[in-house]
Image (cartoon, helix red, strand yellow):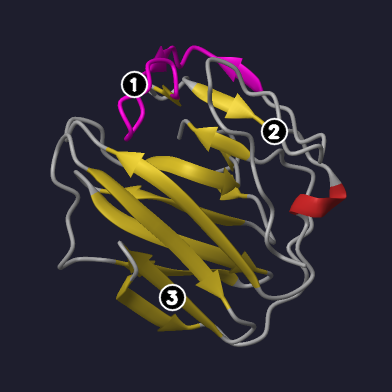
Amino acid sequence: AGDIELPDFDGDAQDASGNGFHGTITGAPATTDRFGNSSGALLFVNDADRVNCGNPTAFNFAGPFTISAWAKSDGSRADSYIVAKYDFDFNTFTGSPHSYGLGTSGVPLPYGFVAGDSGFVDATAYSNPLSPDAWYAVSLVYDGSSLELYVNGQLAAASFVGELPPFVNSVPLTIGGT
């Protein structure tokens, strides 16, 4: 129940699967995908570029889940999200409770995180930096007690988490951005 198919990017963020998970693009122009199809991917140039997928109940996971995405970095952007249901309030210096995300830490190390009532647990692939201009399959798996991060199908990092409350918050799921 924690696996959601998000829209393919063929120049827009409209969900072709029939699930109705349409997104709204801010910035992020269309670019060539990993198969060479023009307008088959989106280019996230700065922190404001993103796709807002809203907050349907399907994105508020009650237990184990997996997030997978294809990503390519140019090596210039640090600390950005690939997919996240998280927000940080710079006025109060607090983050969204009951959140999750997959992104890059530093320039660019794949990482994933989950948050419960008492903080965050993350997994960072320190030995698997993303080389510029190469496509990678990255996946974050929360199985109800641990967090695993995969790069190109290989386990790259893991952390014990323990049981967390449902990942329910009012924050939209976003693709890209920070």
Q: Residue type at mark 1: give it.
A: Thr
Q: The magenta stretch spans which residues?
A: 24-40
Kindly identify which residue carries mark 1: 32
Q: Quadrant of residue 134?
A: top left
The reply to whether callout 2 and callout 3 are in contact (CB within 8 Å) is no
Q: Residue type at mark 2: give it.
A: Cys
Residue drawn 56% across and 65% down?
114
- Taking the view exactly as shown, the residue that stands out farthest to the right is 57
> Disc 2 or 3, which lies upstream in sequence?
2
Residue drawn 15% across and 68% down?
127
Comparing 17 with 75, the one in front is 17
The reply to whether callout 1 and callout 3 are in contact (CB within 8 Å) is no
Residue drawn 36% across and 28% down?
33
Q: Which mark is residue 53?
A: 2
**Residue 142 x %, y %:** 57, 74
> Disc 1 or 3, which lies upstream in sequence?
1
Kindly identify which residue carries mark 3: 148
SS majority, magenta: loop
